Image: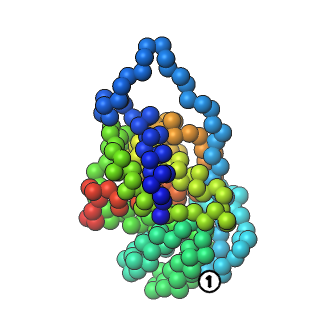
Amino acid sequence: MRNPPLARALFAAVLCVLPGPALAQKAPPAGSSNPPPIRPPIRVPRVMPVRPGLLLNRPPLIDDGTAAVTLYKSTLEFAHCMSRSHPRLLAALLEKPVSSHAEELAVDRLLRRTSGCPGGRLEVSARLLRGAAAESILDNFAVPAPDRATQVNSAQVADFTTAMPSVDRTRDRNSGNVQRFIECQVLLAPGLARNFISTEPGSSKAEEAATQLVAATTRCGNIEAQAGPSQIAYRSFLAEGLYHWTRASASGRFS
């Protein structure tokens, strides 16, 4: 779980981006516009698959874009199947700190409860499984969300950041930065985020939706996830962020 200071910092950042009238902000003095500082792009962690039942400390990396898309599609198929038989196990995985030992145990528990799903033949990345779990659960949510937010309040941000899982920084130094980036994107453009994860992974429509989302949230920063494995990993982060935003939203409900 995330702490209140991070929620306040994220809220302050979003206030700087949303239209002033919706938030009753004062207009800046004429001629005082200052461009935001240029920040280096955020790097998305590389896709690391592990085989069922094996909790590897240093699993092999996937560098090929086609292989990453194929892996994510098979993981989505598995997650959709598990959402029908063991939805609570999927939700439990999304509560675990990212890159933690508890996450490894949750993945292992999922793969041992396949119940007719293709888990026994699946090579799994914990990162992609988190995203696939989020996407499969979101399929059961009916949440009206504008493409671009016109207003947001501190309570929404606090609920959202509290719902987001923590990151085990002793094992993972990158995921926390990616999470903050996608939190900003989801708050500013929840509908566009949903449009992106509703596309087929690796398709031209996915590329178009990702480009549209990034263009609408440029003030969130920059991220190195234009294509290949990085974009698939980025999609998994975004799906999980949207899941927690939906769960924390007062308008979210299971359909």
- Say above or below: 56 vs 68: below
Residue ID at (28%, 65%): 254
Which residue, given by chain and number where applicable, does mark 1 sit on? 53
Farthest top residue in view: 31
Farthest front residue in view: 5
Residue ID at (41%, 66%): 136
Left or right of 229 on screen, residue 118: left
Query: Can see residue 67?
Result: no
Dot 1 amino acid type: Gly
Residue ID at (39%, 76%): 87
Where's residue 198, x and y in %? 42, 54
- Say above or below: 120 vs 149: below
Near-viewer residue (175 or 242): 175
Query: Can see residue 251?
Result: yes
**Secondary element at tag 1:** loop
- Say above or below: 212 vs 34: below
Near-viewer residue (60 or 188): 188
Left or right of 220 on screen, residue 24: left
Where's residue 234, x and y in %? 56, 53
Q: Quadrant of residue 173?
A: bottom right
Q: Quadrant of residue 41?
A: top right
Q: How is the image coloured?
A: rainbow
Where's residue 149, x and y in %? 35, 40
Residue ID at (53%, 50%): 180
The count of marks equals: 1
Left or right of 223 on screen, residue 88: left
Where's residue 65, x and y in %? 65, 55
| Circle 1 residues within 10 Å: few <14, some 14–19, many ≥20 | some
- In the rendered image, the quadrant that contains the C terminus is bottom left
